[in-house]
Image (tube, rainbow, N blue to C red):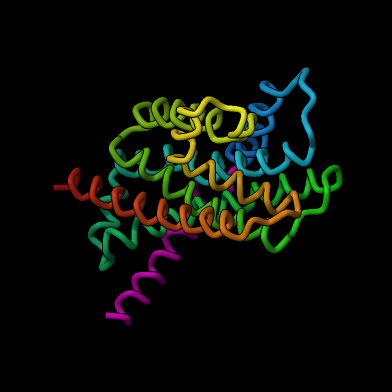
C-alpha cells in the first residue's frame, strides 16, 4: 500500500508540473496575481495610516490566498468542460492523487507570489523571523490552493465558477483580520473569522513579522491550516466523485 501511495504521489507531481506550465506561469496570470493583492489593499487603506509591519503580513497572505486558489477557478472547470479531466480519470491514478496534483500546482504558484511580495516589502518592514515567515507561506499556500479547488469543484465552466469564488474570497478578506485587527471587530464577526482559514494565515505571518511568538497560538495556526487542507481536499474528492457518477 505504501508503494501505491508513493506512485500516486509521483503522478500527482507530474500533474502539478503540467498545470503550472499550462495555467499558472503565464504572463496575464502572473500580472493578475501580482497586481490584485496590492490593488485590494490600496483600495481599502488609501488615506488611512497603516503600519507597514501590520500591512506586510496581510499583503503576503492575500498574495497566497488569490495566487494559490484563484487560478483553480479557471483550470479545473476548463479541464472538465474540454474533457481533459476525463482523460486523467482513465489513467492509473486515484482521484485523490489527481486533486492533490492540482493542489500542489496552486501551492507552487502561491509560494512564488508570496515570496515576490515578501521581497518587495522586506526593505520597508521590520526583518521578520524568516524561517517562521516561510513556514507560514508554505502552509498558507497549500491551504488556499485546496480551498480554491473546493470552490471550483461543483462547476463545469469558468463563468459559473468565477463569480461565487470571487465573492467568497473578497468577503473572507474583510473578516479575517487582513485590514482590521480581530480585536477591533464585533464579537460575532470574530467568531466567524475563526472559521476562516485566512485568519490563521494572517495571524501566523503577523507573529513571524512582529517577533513576539505565542507558541500556543502558533501551533493552533499550523494545526488549523493542516485540518482545513485535509477537509478541503476530502470534500473536493467527494464532490468530483459525485459529479462523475
In the image, is 99 to the left or to the right of 133? left
Prevalent SS, magenta region: helix
Q: Magenta includes 17?
A: yes
Write the residue at 58% across / 39% down: 29
Query: Residue 31: image x %, image y %?
Result: 65, 36
**Residue reaching furthest to the left:** 245
Query: Residue 130: image x %, image y %?
Result: 73, 60
Write the residue at 69% across / 52% down: 115
Give above or below for 92 relative to 128: below
Write the residue at 68% across / 51% down: 207
Near-viewer residue (125 or 184): 184
The residues colored magenta run 1-27
Give above or below for 89 relative to 122: below
Query: Residue 174: image x %, image y %?
Result: 55, 28
- Note whether residue 20 is visible: no
Give above or below for 20 relative to 196: below
In the image, is 49 to the left or to the right of 231? right
- Note whether residue 199 is visible: yes
**Residue reaching furthest to the right:** 123
Give above or below for 76 relative to 166: below
Near-viewer residue (135 or 80): 135
Write the residue at 83% across / 48% down: 126
Quadrant holding the N terminus: bottom left
Amino acid at each position: 500500500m505504501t508503494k501505491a501511495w508513493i506512485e500516486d504521489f509521483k503522478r500527482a507531481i507530474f500533474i502539478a508540473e503540467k498545470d503550472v506550465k499550462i495555467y499558472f506561469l503565464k504572463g496575464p496570470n502572473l500580472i493578475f496575481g501580482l497586481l490584485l493583492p496590492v490593488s485590494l489593499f490600496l483600495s481599502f487603506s488609501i488615506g488611512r495610516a497603516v503600519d507597514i509591519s501590520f500591512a506586510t503580513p496581510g499583503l503576503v497572505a492575500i498574495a497566497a490566498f488569490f495566487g494559490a486558489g484563484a487560478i483553480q477557478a479557471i483550470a479545473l472547470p476548463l479541464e472538465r468542460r474540454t474533457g481533459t479531466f476525463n482523460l486523467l480519470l482513465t489513467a492509473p491514478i486515484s482521484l485523490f492523487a489527481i486533486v492533490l496534483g492540482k493542489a500542489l500546482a496552486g501551492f507552487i504558484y502561491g509560494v512564488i507570489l508570496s515570496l515576490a511580495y515578501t521581497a518587495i516589502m522586506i526593505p520597508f518592514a521590520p526583518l521578520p523571523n524568516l524561517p517562521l515567515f516561510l513556514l507560514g507561506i508554505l502552509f498558507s499556500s497549500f491551504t488556499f490552493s485546496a480551498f480554491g479547488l473546493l470552490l471550483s469543484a461543483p462547476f463545469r465552466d469558468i463563468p459559473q465558477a468565477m463569480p461565487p469564488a470571487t465573492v467568497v474570497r473578497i468577503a473572507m478578506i474583510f473578516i479575517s483580520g487582513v485590514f482590521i485587527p480581530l480585536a477591533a471587530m464585533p464579537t460575532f464577526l470574530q467568531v466567524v473569522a475563526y472559521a476562516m482559514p485566512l485568519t490563521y494565515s494572517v495571524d501566523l505571518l503577523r507573529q513571524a513579522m512582529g517577533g513576539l511568538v505565542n507558541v500556543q497560538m502558533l501551533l493552533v495556526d499550523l494545526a488549523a491550516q493542516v485540518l482545513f487542507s485535509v477537509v478541503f481536499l476530502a470534500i473536493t474528492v467527494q464532490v468530483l466523485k459525485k459529479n462523475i457518477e
